[in-house]
Image: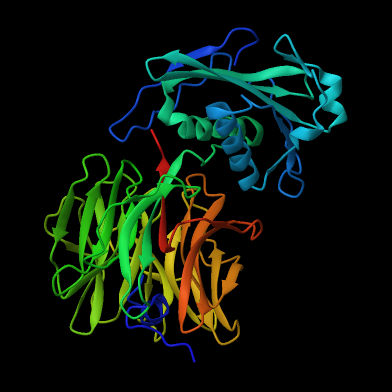
């Protein structure tokens, strides 16, 4: 029989406590670095998207795209690989095997169109990396439309050599936007909880990483358990729950300065922080006397404003992207269900009615969907689902022994969540992504077990 430790995710969630212009010209962008060493994205190239590429059917038939090597080794080869990985990860693109490329298919910087047409490519990415001296590199890339036989985008970046991975994500985002017509999500980071040690007394540390699992940074040392991180949608800041002292409290962590700050000590426990869309305030659940109320407080602390009563368990609040509404879970009707209310706490309305329990709601940045965790006897486990904000159109995306903590990517097309699987006398958590259509689930590699993802905004 599988034994669950006191603070296992399955226990917590079950109690409701968890909650360019034409060649050869290029638009030059001098890319610097912020305090974390990551460069801001470049401004769009002059001329923009003069020849949009048709993406009809991309959801069911990924767009074939040829990515010619920026170099055969070193930084250029690494950039090429990350661009390919990003586009393939989306499920909307299929990078063509370079071994099938016809030799000499780029002549004087321009594609030999017939050769790429034979391969079925709809788009071609070409690029080059050059050493500028002093630790600086220049990365050039061009996106070509095979259909219109023209250049769609061309941009150059100059940055420190250590920023090559972020430049690759920025290029992939540009390709995604030009070919899909929506902003990409690759140049973003994810906060999560890294888990290690024995199941009976796990070490849970707050961490942050690139969306694809690279560049992991541990932000707490594990001496106090951390859970439920939330990314500020407007700046590089996190909120999270820490079990420092006798009761869990909400802290913020500034990713640029490395400063941790207590938001406040309210009630017996404070749980499940979520930022407002402008990043200036926090929602959280404050428990006491057998119930829990949702409160609003400034991101830097201050007097809390109570939005629900505490006669029932009201937890896991999340703003709509326009800040006008809040979705939350409550047992006021006898079991954990989802409710939507006004941002001032007025007009609470139940939106979930399935035969089971609903928890951990997360509002899409597009405003069209709410993701949630569900479990009930008819599904035989836990599921990640989505529904419209009025409760209609409910559908399951993922299912398992335990899945939870769904978080949308910046453009709302992909969800990251954690999946827990039994392993002997214990369990193991890992992160996965899946499209909002329920396809293309992919595991995100981390060096230890991981849970509680919170997907941050595109980096600025």
Residue 362, image quadrant? bottom left
Q: Nearer the viewer, residue 224 or 322?
A: 224
Figure label count: 0
Q: Nearer the viewer, residue 313 or 147?
A: 147
The residue drawn where x is 18% and y is 84% is: 289
- Say whether residue 195 is left or right of residue 76: left
Residue 94 point in image, percent of width and height = 72, 42
Q: Nearer the viewer, residue 271 or 290?
A: 271
Residue 223 point in image, percent of width and height = 21, 65
The residue drawn where x is 47% and y is 87% is: 2
Residue furthest out toward the front: 73
The residue drawn where x is 81% and y is 22% is: 103
Residue 268 point in image, percent of width and height = 16, 76
Is residue 389 at least partly visible in the picture? no
The residue drawn where x is 58% and y is 41% is: 86
Residue furthest out toward the bottom: 1
Q: Quadrant of the C terminus?
A: top left
Residue 351 point in image, percent of width and height = 48, 70
In the rendered view, how is the structure colored? rainbow
Is residue 149 at least partly visible in the picture? yes
Whether residue 34 is situated above or below residue 283 in the rendered picture: above
- Say whether residue 296 is left or right of residue 207: left
Residue 340, image quadrant? bottom left
Whether residue 335 is situated above or below residue 64 in the rendered picture: below
Whether residue 392 is situated above or below residue 47 in the rendered picture: below
Whether residue 163 is situated above or below residue 24 in the rendered picture: below
């Amino acid at each position: 029989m599988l034994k669950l430790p006191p603070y296992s995710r399955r226990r917590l969630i079950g109690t409701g406590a968890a909650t360019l212009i034409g060649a050869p010209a290029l638009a030059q962008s001098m890319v610097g670095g912020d305090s974390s060493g990551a460069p801001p994205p470049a401004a769009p190239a002059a001329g923009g998207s003069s020849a949009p590429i048709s993406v009809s059917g991309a959801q069911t038939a990924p767009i074939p795209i040829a990515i010619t090597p920026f170099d055969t080794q070193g930084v250029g080869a690494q950039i090429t690989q990350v661009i390919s990985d990003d586009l393939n990860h989306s499920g909307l693109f299929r990078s063509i095997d370079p071994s099938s490329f016809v030799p000499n298919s780029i002549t004087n910087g321009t594609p030999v169109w017939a050769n790429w047409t034979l391969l079925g490519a709809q788009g071609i990415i070409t690029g080059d990396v050059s050493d500028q001296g002093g630790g600086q590199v220049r990365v050039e890339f061009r996106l070509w439309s095979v259909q219109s036989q023209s250049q769609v985008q061309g941009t150059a970046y100059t940055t420190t050599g250590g920023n090559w991975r972020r430049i690759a994500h920025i290029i992939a985002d540009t390709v995604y936007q030009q070919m899909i017509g929506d902003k990409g999500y690759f140049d973003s980071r994810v906060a999560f909880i890294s888990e290690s040690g024995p199941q009976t007394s796990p070490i849970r540390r707050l961490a942050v990483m690139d969306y694809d699992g690279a560049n992991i940074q541990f932000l707490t040392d594990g001496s106090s358990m951390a859970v439920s991180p939330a990314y500020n949608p407007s700046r590089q800041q996190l909120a999270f729950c820490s079990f420092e002292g006798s009761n869990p409290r909400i802290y913020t962590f500034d990713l640029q300065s490395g400063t941790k700050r207590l938001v406040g000590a309210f009630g017996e426990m404070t749980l499940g922080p979520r930022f407002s869309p402008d990043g200036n305030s926090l929602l959280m659940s404050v428990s006491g006397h057998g119930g829990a109320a949702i409160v609003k407080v400034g991101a830097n602390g201050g007097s809390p404003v109570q939005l629900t009563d505490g006669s029932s368990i009201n937890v896991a609040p999340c703003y709509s992207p326009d800040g006008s509404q809040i979705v939350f879970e409550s047992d006021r009707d006898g079991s954990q269900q989802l409710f939507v209310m006004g941002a001032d706490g007025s007009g609470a309305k139940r939106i979930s009615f399935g035969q089971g329990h609903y928890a951990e709601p997360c509002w899409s940045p597009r405003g069209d969907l709410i993701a949630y965790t569900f479990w009930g006897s008819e599904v035989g486990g836990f599921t990640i689902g989505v529904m419209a904000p009025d409760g209609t159109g409910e559908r399951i995306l993922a299912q398992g022994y335990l899945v939870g903590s769904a978080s949308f990517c910046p453009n709302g097309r992909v969800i990251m969540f954690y999946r827990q699987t039994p392993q002997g006398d214990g369990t193991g958590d890992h992160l996965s992504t899946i499209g909002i259509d329920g396809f293309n689930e992919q595991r995100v590699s981390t060096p230890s077990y991981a849970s509680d993802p919170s997907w941050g905004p595109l980096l600025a």
